Amino acid sequence: MGGTFDPFHAGHLKVAETAIEKLPIDFVWFVPAAKPPHKKKCMFSFEERINLIKEAIKDNSSFSIWEKDIRENDKSFTYYLIKELKDLYPNYQFFFIIGADNVLKLKTWYRFEDLLEMIDFIVIDRKTQNKKEWKHLDYFHKLIFLDMPLINISSTKIRKDLIKNFNKA
């Protein structure tokens, strides 16, 4: 499960717990992007985001963190992550967990066609999207939908609340 995790929160944990509970997967690696290609700057440093995740998952043996996303001059592209994991663990089957808001954006990801050959995507479906609108996508067959209730929390909202509260102080 990759992402910026800026910051990591209970909603991220619930997604991973639901995936373990409802799908035939054994383990979830949380992979914070050191240099997200879609963001100019994160509120929390890479190290702070790693520490937040470590603290949140410390009591769950089905969760771990992949903190090796440090690349000196490169963005954190999912393609490189999956390639590295598949090279290190050739007998494992990998999936990548994404939110439904990313389904149409997938074709803009770096080396997306190669990613489609390497993995399937688990899409967290909060009933806010209509799957019928995606049936025409040539990669629809690579999407595994995981239904779960809407969680009223987001990293964006947390950051906005932090800034609002900081400005009041």
Image: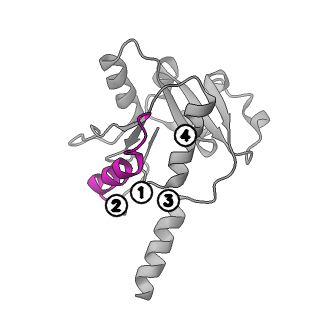
- Confirm or deny contact between disc 1 and disc 3 (CB under 8 A): yes
Q: Which residue is mark 1?
A: 6
- Confirm or deny contact between disc 4 and disc 2 (CB under 8 A): no
Q: Amino acid at mark 1?
A: Asp
From the image, state whether disc 4 or disc 2 is nearer to you. Answer: 4
Question: Which numbered disc flags the more N-terminal residue, 4 or 2?
Answer: 4
Q: In this view of the protein, which residue sits in the foreground, 123 or 9?
A: 9
Q: For mark 4, give the secondary structure.
A: helix
Q: In this view of the protein, which residue sits in the foreground, 149 or 106?
A: 149
Q: For mark 3, give the secondary structure.
A: helix
Q: For mark 1, give the secondary structure.
A: loop
Residue 65 position within the rendered picture, expressed as x and y whole percent measured from the top left? 35, 39
Q: Which residue is mark 3?
A: 155
- Confirm or deny contact between disc 2 and disc 1 (CB under 8 A): yes
**Badge 3 density bin: few <14, some 14–19, many ≥20, Cα 10 Å:** some
**Badge 4 density bin: few <14, some 14–19, many ≥20, Cα 10 Å:** some
- In whole angstroms, how far apart are the C-alphas of marks 1 and 3? 6 Å
- In whole angstroms, how far apart are the C-alphas of marks 2 and 3? 11 Å
Q: Which residues are magenta?
A: 44-62
Question: Which numbered disc flags the more N-terminal residue, 2 or 1?
Answer: 1
Name the residue furthest bottom: 169
Name the residue furthest top: 91
Q: Amino acid at mark 3?
A: Ser
Relative vertical location of residue 169 with respect to residue 121 in this rendering, above or below? below
Q: Amino acid at mark 2?
A: Phe
Indicate the quadrant where residue 32 lies. top left
Q: Which residue is mark 4?
A: 17
User: What secondary structure predominates along the stretch shown in magenta?
Assistant: helix
Q: Residue at x 47, y 18 (%)?
A: 93
Q: Is residue 38 visible?
A: yes
